[in-house]
Amino acid sequence: MHLLPIPIEANVFQSLLCSSSFWCFPSNNLQFTTKNCHIRMTTGRLPIMDLKQAYDVELMSSTSKIQHELWPLDEIDSKNGKLPCCLVWTPLPVVSWLAPFIGHLGICREDGVILDFSGSNFVNVDEFAFGATARYVQLDREQCCFPLNMCSHTCKKGYQHSEYGTAVTWDDALRLSVRHFEHKSYNLFTCNSHSFVANCLNRLCYGGSMDWNMLNVAALILFKGHWVDNMSIIRSFLPSTVVLCLGLVLVGWPFLVGLFSFSLILFCWFLLGTYCLKTLLES
């Protein structure tokens, strides 16, 4: 191994000392003397251990930058309708009277503002279309993938996620979905509020999944959701209970059979459109 003397000027030497690139060499392979203003470097390859340590430091630095974006959220304020990073649900007029498991769905920004697809080429902002929130579930941003580039995906579906459309923050994903649905026609059976929420979750790759659709989004709020208060429960089930009782009194058991058939047909439609005819329903 040979030592290579590199003569430099004193002012250049001082600037090199302050340069980050100057210190990229391991200290045991670098010698300098201020008397002769010479730098002596040993030629050879950098040790693998030093390269690994440098990589680990860079990885930790990049990870901390991403973590920094996840600033603390405000507390859930259901009375004022501020539910940061939550899915929110409310019953639909008439439809929910016949099938109480069907309702209108929205998703909240990090500041708690509700976004919901409630009409053709229109996404509602901070005004839930069909009344106050009755049920909600808060999502964990740690389960989202916010890639800065192709190499920084935390999910296992990097190429599929990039092709679908990625985001660097929660609000950024919602903003992209809003732009997408501003050019969509609303249809209760093919492109509704659940489609909008599923699109947002796919952009977030929430839970490492790119398969969010109307059914699993509805199941998420149905099985993991929390009621806002007791009045929300009454508002959700009282109309359907009244309709059921009136139908039994005026029509009898055939009404109950017809109501059950209506619910079954709706469920089969969404099941068929989601998993068999995948281009039929928007997500």
Image (cartoon, rainbow, N blue to C red):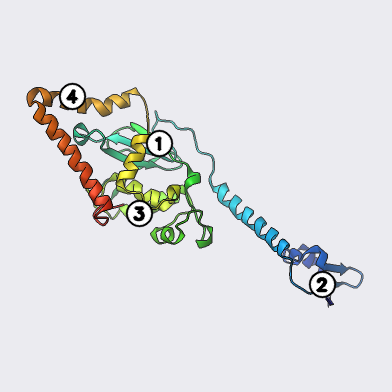
Is residue 237 shown left or right of residue 198? left
User: Tag 4: residue type?
Assistant: Val
Query: What is the distance, in whole Å, between disc 4 and disc 2 at their CAs?
Result: 88 Å
In the figure, 197 relative to 59: above or below?
Answer: above
Q: Name the residue under label 1.
A: 137
Q: Mark 2 points at which residue?
A: 41
Query: What is the distance, in whole Å, between disc 3 and disc 1 at their CAs?
Result: 24 Å
Secondary structure beneath disc 4? helix
Going from N to C along the chain, the mark reached first, 1 or 2, is 2
In the figure, 227 relative to 30: above or below?
Answer: above
* Whole-percent x, y for residue 14 in the image: 81, 66
The label shown at residue 179 is 3
* Image depth: mark 3 or mark 4 in front: 4
Residue in the foreground of this view, choosing between 68 and 226: 226
Secondary structure beneath disc 2? strand
Other-residue count near label 3 (Cα within 10 Å), few / some / many at <14 / 14–19 / ≥20: few
User: Tag 2: residue type?
Assistant: Met
Going from N to C along the chain, the mark reached first, 1 or 4, is 1
Residue in the foreground of this view, choosing between 60 and 183: 60
The label shown at residue 242 is 4
Going from N to C along the chain, the mark reached first, 3 or 2, is 2
